Each structure stands twice: as C-alpha cells, then as structure tokens.
Image (tube, rainbow, N blue to C red):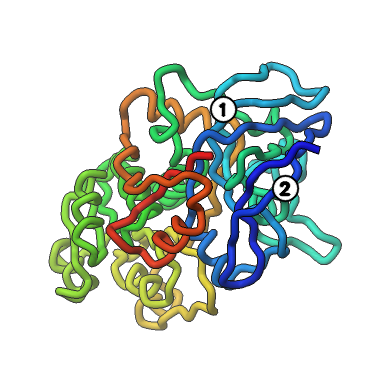
C-alpha cells in the first residue's frame, strides 16, 4: 500500500513526522494532495495535552491542495482541481446542518450534545499536516480555488479567516459600531479585519507585541492599546468618553481577557467570544450588571462547508482583504517538528507558518 509522510500526535509534548498509508476515499469522499497547510493554536493545545485526541492521529485542519482521487458518488468536481476544505466539515444532511449550524454537525450522542462535532480534521479523523488528506462528504466541503490566487493567499480561509470573521458576524457588528478586539494573534487579526468589513467605524486592538499591533493597524484597527503600558479597560473608556464599545471580541481564551471584554461593553453591548478556554470561566458581578445590563454573550465555532469557503475565497479574490502578510515563516513538511517548536513558543515574531509537503 502506498505510504505518505504525516505529522502524528504521539503523546502530550510530542508530535512527530512519520509514515502512514495514503487514504482511499469512500463513495462520498475525496483525497486531496496537500500543497500548503499550516499550524493552528488549537494544534498547540493538542501538543500540550490541553485538548485530548487519540494517539496516532494526524494533526492539522487547514488544507489547500489538489484533488488526487474522487469517491465513486462524487460529482461536479474533477481530479487535478485546486481546492480548499474548511476546518469544519459538515455532512450537509445532519440535524445540525439542516438547522443551519453545520459547525456542530455530528455532535449528537445518545447522551446529548457535544460541542465541536463538525471539527473532524485532526480531531476525530486524520488531519492535513500530511502529503494527502481524506476529505469527508466532499460535495459539501470542497471549494475550488479561483484562478490567479496563490496557496498563501487562501491559506487562512479554512480556519482563522472564517473564525475571525465570524467573531464580527456573530457579534452583529454594524455600520458605525465601535469594536474592541482583545488579542491580535492570527484569529484576533482576522476578527479586526472582519469588523472593518462589517462596517465598524472605530476598531480598537489590544495586545502587547509591537509586530502584532502594527499588523492590527494594517488589518483595519484605528487605535491600538498595549496592555502592558496602560489598563486596557480604562483606556477604552477614555477613548469612548465613558460610553464603552458596541461589540467586544475575545480572541485569546483566558479569564482575564473575557472579563476585560465584558467590562468594556456599553449597556446592551455584545461580547463575542472566539477563545478556546482551558478552565472554567467566572462572570464578574459588577461588569455583568447583576444580569440587568442587557448584555449579550455569544460564542462561535469556525463556520465551515463549501459555501462558507466560496464566500471567503470571493472576498480574497475581490481584494477586500489581504491576509497573505500573516504568513511570517515557511517550512517543508520534513521540518514540521521545527515549525511546531517555533510556533508553539511564539518566537521570532511568528504569526502563521506555511507548511509545504
């Protein structure tokens, strides 16, 4: 059986490059040859043992590639076609998909619902930090890459662009809104760009890394706050003349940033949470106005599926946003362990890495 190289989770603290059989598609699936992929912050949670997955699983959920083989029942695609697939791969026919929440596709169990059911790559099935990846339910998930776009131009679409933009969408950012985005990592930077596209007239970005604050301005931030230099909540209130923001987007996943978002809101404002939390959250009584402040708290898992990917690809094709500059480092698949060490320790100003098999 032909074999391929793949980044495999061995145990907490160890993701290594090894070999696996090249997958063979079922009737509704497709196998794509991966041309570019990347490492996500969620992969670091897996590496550290903070998010459990099965040992021996191939990691990664952001594929750009070429269709290598189609399942017997797959139509409207052809082998050799350039495509992407979202990090979330809904079936299109589950209860969650038909209810309009494809990100939770497959989440049902006999004992109730489990979040993140639609996230399969590198979670419940082999992912795409490999030479080949099997895409389930191909007709619901493969999106052709428009001619003229490079891999790196579309590399953010499968996850961080979709997730970051959804922070603004779920927060219902409107024309004229004032928005703050806490944390300007890749997700936060995409949330900043998404808030701008949704019509926010004033965007405040919070971080402490100079390169990330500079990139936040490039993505559309009007003001930036270094949280080590000033108290960010006090500074937000000063900038808004005590009004607070319409929408606060939390893009880190900590108690501190969650609280700061809540404290930054105007009465009736919305906290849009994108962070992946590794401990229980506590809602502060004062900031929550004892439950009487008409606040809204919403959470979002990265929207997936081919229609979501098509829309994001069109945004890139139309030049409405350029996320290519987020790729700061490039590695071959053979260097995946070195790439994890750099990205996991956030060295050398890294934002995103491009991995090329």
Are there few (<14), some (14-19), or many (20+) residues within 10 Å of tag 1? many
Q: Provide residue 199's location: percent of width, then percent of height.
A: 29, 40
Which residue appears at 33% of the width and 65% of the height?
267
Q: Nearer the viewer, mark 1 or mark 2?
A: 2
61 sits left or right of 349 in the view: right
Could you tell me which quadrant the N terminus lies in?
top right
In the figure, residue 270 lies in which quadrant? bottom left
Look at mark 1 in the image and give the residue it sits on. 83
Q: Are marks 1 and 2 in contact (CB under 8 Å)?
A: no
Residue 217 in view (yes/no): yes
Residue 104 in view (yes/no): no
Which residue appears at 74% of the width and 18% of the height?
75
Nearest to N terminus: mark 1 or mark 2: 2
Q: Is residue 162 above or below residue 278?
A: above
Q: Is residue 155 above or below residue 81?
A: below
In the figure, residue 193 lies in which quadrant? top left
Q: Provide residue 290's location: percent of width, then percent of height.
A: 42, 80
Give how far apart the Cα atoms at labels 1 and 2 are.
23 Å
Which residue appears at 62% of the width and 19% of the height?
80
Look at mark 2 in the image and give the residue it sits on. 20
Foreground residue among 269 and 36:
36
* Mark 2 element type: strand
């Amino acid at each position: 059986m032909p074999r391929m190289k793949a980044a495999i989770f061995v145990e907490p603290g160890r993701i290594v490059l090894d070999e696996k059989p090249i997958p063979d598609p079922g009737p509704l699936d497709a196998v794509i040859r991966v041309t570019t992929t990347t490492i996500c912050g969620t992969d670091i949670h897996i590496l550290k043992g903070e998010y459990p997955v099965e040992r021996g699983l191939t990691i990664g959920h952001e594929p750009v590639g070429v269709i290598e083989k189609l399942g017997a029942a797959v139509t409207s695609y052809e082998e050799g076609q350039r495509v992407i697939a979202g990090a979330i791969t809904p079936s299109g026919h589950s209860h969650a998909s038909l209810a309009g929440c494809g990100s939770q596709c497959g989440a049902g169990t006999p004992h109730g619902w489990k979040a993140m059911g639609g996230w399969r790559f590198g979670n419940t099935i082999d992912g795409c930090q490999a030479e080949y990846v099997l895409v389930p339910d191909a007709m619901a998930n493969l999106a052709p890459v428009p001619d003229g776009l490079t891999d790196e131009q579309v590399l953010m679409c499968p996850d961080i662009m979709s997730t970051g933009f959804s922070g603004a969408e779920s927060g219902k950012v409107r024309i004229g809104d004032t928005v703050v985005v806490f944390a300007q990592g890749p997700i936060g930077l995409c949330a900043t760009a998404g808030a701008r596209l949704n019509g926010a007239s004033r965007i405040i970005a919070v971080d402490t890394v100079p390169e990330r604050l500079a990139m936040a301005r490039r993505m559309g931030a009007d003001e930036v706050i270094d949280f080590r230099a000033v108290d960010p909540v006090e500074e937000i209130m000063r900038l808004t003349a005590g009004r607070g923001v319409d929408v606060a987007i939390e893009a880190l996943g900590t108690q501190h940033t969650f609280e700061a978002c809540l404290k930054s809101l105007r009465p009736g404002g919305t906290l849009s949470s994108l962070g992946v939390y590794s401990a229980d959250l506590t809602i502060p009584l004062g900031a929550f106005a004892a439950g009487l402040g008409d606040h809204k708290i919403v959470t979002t898992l990265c929207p997936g599926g081919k229609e979501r990917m098509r829309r994001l690809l069109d945004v890139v094709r139309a030049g409405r946003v350029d996320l290519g500059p987020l790729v700061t480092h490039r590695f071959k698949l053979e260097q995946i362990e070195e790439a994890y060490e750099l990205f996991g320790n956030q060295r050398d100003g890294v934002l995103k890495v491009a991995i090329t098999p």
